[in-house]
Image: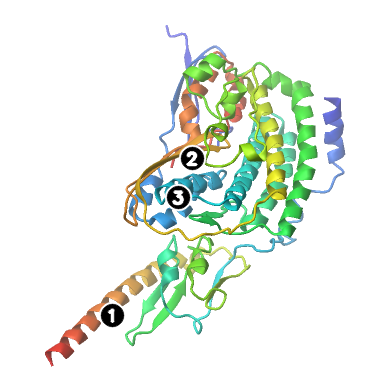
Amino acid sequence: MFKSMLEAFLNLFKPLHTGGYPAKEIVLPDGYRGLIEYDGEACIYCDKCEKVCPPGAILFYQQENGEKKYRYNPWLCIYCGECVRACPKPQEALWQSETKQQPALKEEGVNEQWFVWEAACQNSREAYTTAKKAAKTGTNEK
Amino acid sequence: MKKTVQIPLGSQHISLLEPIRFKFECENEKIIGVDADVGFVHRGVELACTRKFEFKQVGYVVARVCGLCAITHSLSYTLAVEKLLGYEANDRIKYLRMLMVELDRIHSHMLCLAHTAENAGFEALFMQIMAQREPVMDIQEAISGNRVQFDYISIGGVNRDLTPDLSALIHKNLAALSEKVDALMMLFDTNWSLSLKYKGIGVLSLENAYTYNALGPLARAAGLASDVRSESSDLPYEAVGYTMVLESSGDIHARNFVRLREIVNSIAMCRNIVDNLPVGEIQEKVKGKPKGEAVVRVEAPRGELFYLVRGSGQNILERVRIKTPTFSGIPAMMEVFKGSQYADAPAILASFDPCMSCTAK
């Protein structure tokens, strides 16, 4: 017991375990799983990342001219890296960076905006397929 | 006139941050009857696994059942699905998975020891153990890329490989930890004020451990040799130097010592794995869809974790059943409380290491 009392007394003069946070930044290790980053020019729009994503944080918006637009929700993402492993062109079109995502503020309304975007993506696909079907039947009739 | 008084512990209590309630029937200070209730939170994880997520995504969902033993949950699920797909991982994958599970066991046991010390009124020791636990978390963060949610195991392998730098880091941190664990064993054994709180208190006899189906460190402290690591052949534990840790007295002190000695054993196993890692691929392609039923048992830090997975050849599974160690251990826990003093209840409870986020899934 006296030994542990001595230990407790000596602990007063030891350096802090908790460090200087928040004044000193946390050092992230090499290979930290951070944000998913994307390059639209290299992307071939196979939608594989969208299909494998567990929380559904990657969505593609279908434009009327056939092109797709990538949208990513860093607050929904769990940083598992499944999308990067599924990507046919990893490191070129889609890769995992070591940047840490900052927490969102309530004023930014990230959830509300994302729900709107989710619905828009769903609708855009349905509209695109119906338009395509209509065009196909139209040409057949001619 | 009624001679007993009812005192609840939980669902909100200062020594218990999680939603479980024990209702004690007390005669003066002595507990004579216990009633437990765990149904305060339901997150619907099992149903979500069979409705919303495809079987390849479920591994990441079940990892969110528990923050402390996330790797054990994803490992059990992955093993079950791999059984259904008729795939067996190569040795390198098995060893890397074991490494993560053992690291997880070390830091989970240290957390429990810290909480037991805190609930016995030794706040400084709590801080000390939590600080010593940090290097283990650093290893896990360096290996998997995240501190708590590792997302390390996927169907057909593991997501990252072990580099020479990482091996050096593991050896360095484990060597430092090993010395500190020796000091902790000394402290837990010889400290007089801790012995008042731990020795001979919260005793579970071998007979009761057998009758009430105790599991994990709770059973091993009572002398009941029950450990899935020695019973199941899913992972080659014998090859990396696993030894069963048994104590006989069954009190809080014995439970602490089972944990401390298991930490020592796990450190030895981790060193063996890092030094003798077999060569091979870390990720293999697994084709097909799960059809049939598979049962997997894995030794989580708190005891046996049980998974049942049933698929019908579809992308969405039919049934995922998770039986967690804390839930299975509640009858034995209730038995331990009977006959002890009410003032000891928080320390006894902490020594069970109850994980309510596992139980309320």
Q: Is B293 above or below relative to B255?
A: below
> Which circle's residue, 2 or 3, is located before the other in the chain?
3
Taking the view exactly as shown, the residue that stands out farthest to the top is B1
Q: Name which residue lies at 42% across and 80% down.
A: A69
For this orientation, the residue located farthest to the bottom is: A142
Residue B332 left/right relative to B42 = right
Circles 2 and 3 in contact, beta carbons < 8 Å? no
Looking at the image, the residue that sits furthest to the left is A141
Q: How is the image coloured?
A: rainbow
For residue B358, which numbered disc appears in the image? Answer: 2
Which quadrant holds residue B40? Answer: top left
Name above or below for residue A105 compared with residue B171: below
The residue that mark 3 highlights is: B82
Asked whether the viewer can see residue B191, the reply is no
Residue that carries the numbered disc 1 in the rendered image: A128
The kind of secondary structure element at disc 2 is helix
Label 3 crowd (10 A; few <14 / some 14-19 / many >=20): many
